[in-house]
Image (cartoon, rainbow, N blue to C red):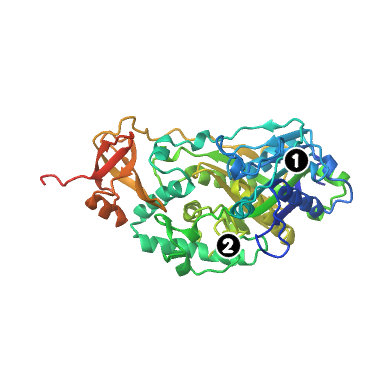
Amino acid sequence: MVADSTPVIIGVGQFSERVGEPGYEGLNYMDLAGRALSAAISDSSASGEVARNIDTLAAIRAFEMSRPSKEPPFGAPDNIPRAIAKRVGADPARAILTPTGGQTNQQLVGEFASAIAAGESRCAVVVGSEAISTVLALSARGEKPDWSEEVGGEYEDQGFGIEELMEPALFAHGATGAIPLYALAENARRAKLGKGLEEYRLDIGRLFEPFTHVAAANPHAAAPKIRSAEELATVTERNRIVAEPYTRMTVARDQVNQAAAIIVASAGLAREMGVPEDRWVHIHAVTAATELKLSQRPDLAAAPASIASVEAALDRAGKRMDEIGYIDFYSCFAIPVFNQVEHFGLAADDPRGLTLTGGLPFFGGAGNNYSAHAIAEAVERARRDRGAYALVGANGGWMSKYATGIYSTDPADWSANDRFEKLPTADNGVPVAKEPGSRATVESYTINHSRAGSDAVFIGRNDAGERVIGNADLSDQATRDLFESGEPFGDTLALEMDERGRTIGRLAPMPGL
């Protein structure tokens, strides 16, 4: 007999639409989320009322609501979580607008499960959506619908939660988004392996080729097409370099219309609502970890907090990686997957697969809510393969935050309420130089490519061992040749400040020349 206070997932739901396809409605964020939550309620197969028993609802921030300076182009409700709740007839006592981060939904499953085990909640929902594809399509046609709503009521705005993501020196030198920041880490890994650009791009292609097969079979995927490793790796006009070493096809696809929802309830309430026990999926572990800032990491290629999160979850679940039947590693870019694969000795073609959805470049990068889709897929796999275990790894920021969940139909004992854990953050960061000094040795770099041109960002160390961030001077031919070769690692740059206060590096002349 599962104790009444045990948290269980009773329902999951997904909804999606693709612009121009049959049945496309051009739904806004709230309607997409409402459809997903309605699907999750139906998925529970409850004979009683679910919506009115929801006491907590957390709405995941959409990308266009994830920065203080960013405003949704068509407006938004004055109370986002309650706007979603009203679409299913729910009136939760606690309504939450979450912080930013792709790990948030996975972490919230753990937090809500712990609250349920402690008797502080009986039924909690995590729900989110993205409608970027529809926004772009409508904007291209010059349309501007009004997506604002007056809902009213109280809610907890937990803030943007972007403090750990702030990298002033990197931002000042043009590494202002996920693609160049991940590219810096990816090239640091490439340097450690001693691989050239083309060879490494093929590694990425081989990692992601199996993901395309999963996406092609997923009705919610934004790009359901099988692609070969060579196709993913080969640079063409359509598959251009967005930032070295990434081709366009191998980065997260944010132009999606996708929503997903997860309902967690106490076993006691699940019984009261008439949810059949064959719908229950147990939460065996959730762990959350925060990484050092990218510019402070001793090894720019590594993300030890993410490894620690997965290891801690496995330990709390009492499982080894080879006992996990289903895996979804967050795959906005290759390096978060590579780090897990290398640590646990997995192969890119592991027969279990490394994604349950098709991954962010192919299924779609549904903003901060992607891992809700992964959890939904994990729940469905666990129900079909009873007694098997599924692991979901959720990543936020620039490998800045990580949360891991392990799920199975096997019961989990929550009597000690110790299956959710926040891990401590490391304190061994490399100091970032306040004054860069006269020279630096290159540790990693990327070249951003855009319609405005190309610029090279580097991270290195000065003579004091401090981190230095700057732009390589591509107007200097020797410096351009070095960076475009893809092999500036270990070379010394002479530094100076430009009129905008940026650090500019040029290939230093050889001693004696």
| Vertical arrangement, residue 209 with respect to residue 137, above or below | below
Horizontal side of 325 relative to 197 (left or right) equals right
| Vertical arrangement, residue 180 with respect to residue 377, above or below | above
Going by the numbered disc 2, the residue's amino acid type is Gly
From where the camera sits, is residue 194 visible? Answer: yes
Q: Which residue is mark 1?
A: 83
Residue 493 place in picture, x, y as percent: 25, 43
Label 1 crowd bin: few (<14), some (14–19), many (20+), radius 10 Å:
many
What mark, if any, has residue 466 been given in the picture? none
Q: CA distance from mark 2 to mark 1?
A: 37 Å
From where the camera sits, is residue 411 visible? Answer: no
Residue 159 place in picture, x, y as percent: 61, 32
Horizontal side of 268 relative to 288 (left or right) equals right
Going by the numbered disc 1, the residue's amino acid type is Ala
Quick one: 80 or 106, which is closer to the camera? Answer: 80
Q: Residue at x 23, y 52 (%)?
A: 477
Report which quarter residue 96 is drawn in: top right
